[in-house]
Image (cartoon, grey):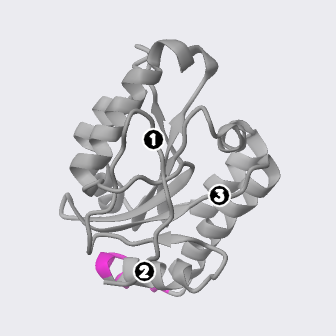
């Protein structure tokens, strides 16, 4: 689990949105080279999705998700705190919008919360897809995230060590596994330009089909 801060707190090695947007492909490539991850995800939420924020702030929930993702999946997430709400909200939304537009060709509006799964190879994005997160309570929101990460973990358990750098094939297997669950809304990915954001981050569901 890899936190992204809404604004630069000016301490330690924390990374904030603008810096993340500039360096995330490099970070992903380093994680692959160091054996920390074979693919990636970004949990997208804002101050209107407190259930997700509470899951990520609860030590037991967070540790569980971190353990499940392990060295299979680096999960980026937004570190939201109430002190950022008034001072940083506009900048945070603008920076996140710009990041998703430039890197993932955002066109249509989608409703938060959501999770973006993506794959990087040789410091370039080669594929991605979004899943809507529907649950409104903390417990169910945790179980929803847990279920998605367990699917990735299940796929990785089937892959031998020598094949863990076959990034395209791994990501295709992850897409197939997640798409197989009828209760998960998967949104069409890199085959089409699909995301557009206005003044706030909003998501609507679309039907996903494999490339």
Residue 143 in sight in this render: yes
Viewer-side residue, 147 vs 59 = 147
Residue 56 at x, y percent in the picture: 66, 42
Question: Which residue is found at the position 41% from the left and 52% from the top?
Answer: 109
Q: Name the residue under label 2.
A: 161
Cα–Cα span, label 1 and label 2: 38 Å
Cα–Cα span, label 1 and label 3: 29 Å
Chain-order first, disc 2 or disc 3: 3
Chain-order first, disc 1 or disc 2: 2
- Mark 1 or 3: in front is 1
Circle 1 Cα neighbour tier, 10 Å, few/some/many (<14 / 14–19 / ≥20): many
Residue 19 at x, y percent in the picture: 29, 31
- Mark 2 or 3: in front is 3
Q: Look at the image and tell me in which quarter the C terminus lies.
A: bottom left
Q: Name the residue under label 1.
A: 201
Image height of 25 relative to 207, above or below:
above
Circle 2 Cα neighbour tier, 10 Å, few/some/many (<14 / 14–19 / ≥20): few
Q: Name the residue under label 3.
A: 67
Label pair 1/3, CB-CB below 8 angstroms:
no
Q: Is residue 201 left or right of residue 192?
A: right
Residue 48 at x, y percent in the picture: 62, 35
Circle 3 Cα neighbour tier, 10 Å, few/some/many (<14 / 14–19 / ≥20): few
Residue 195 at x, y percent in the picture: 34, 55
Label pair 2/3, CB-CB below 8 angstroms:
no
Q: Give the range drawn in magenta.
A: 159-168
Viewer-side residue, 84 vs 76 = 84
Label pair 1/2, CB-CB below 8 angstroms:
no
Residue 105 counted in the magenta span: no
- Mark 1 or 2: in front is 1
Image height of 119 relative to 58, above or below:
below
Q: Report helix, strand or loop for mark 2.
A: helix
Cα–Cα span, label 2 and label 3: 19 Å
């Amino acid at each position: 689990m890899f936190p992204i801060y809404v604004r630069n707190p000016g301490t330690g090695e924390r990374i904030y949105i603008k810096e993340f947007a500039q360096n995330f492909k490099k970070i992903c490539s380093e994680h692959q080279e160091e054996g920390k991850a074979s693919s990636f995800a970004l949990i997208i939420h804002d101050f209107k999705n407190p259930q997700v924020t509470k899951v990520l702030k609860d030590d037991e929930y967070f540790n569980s998700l971190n353990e499940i993702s392990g060295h299979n999946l680096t999960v980026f997430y937004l570190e939201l705190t109430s002190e950022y709400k008034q001072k940083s909200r506009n900048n945070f939304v603008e920076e996140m919008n710009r990041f998703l537009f430039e890197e993932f060709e955002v066109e249509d509006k989608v409703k938060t919360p959501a999770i973006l799964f993506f794959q990087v190879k040789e410091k370039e994005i080669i594929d991605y897809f979004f899943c809507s997160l529907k649950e409104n309570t903390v417990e169910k929101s945790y179980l929803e995230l847990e279920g998605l990460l367990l699917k990735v973990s299940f796929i990785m358990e089937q892959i031998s060590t020598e094949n863990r750098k076959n990034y395209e094939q791994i990501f295709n297997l992850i897409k197939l596994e997640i798409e197989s669950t009828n209760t998960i809304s998967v949104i069409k990915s890199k085959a089409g330009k699909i995301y557009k954001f206005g003044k706030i981050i909003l998501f609507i569901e679309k039907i996903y089909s494999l490339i």
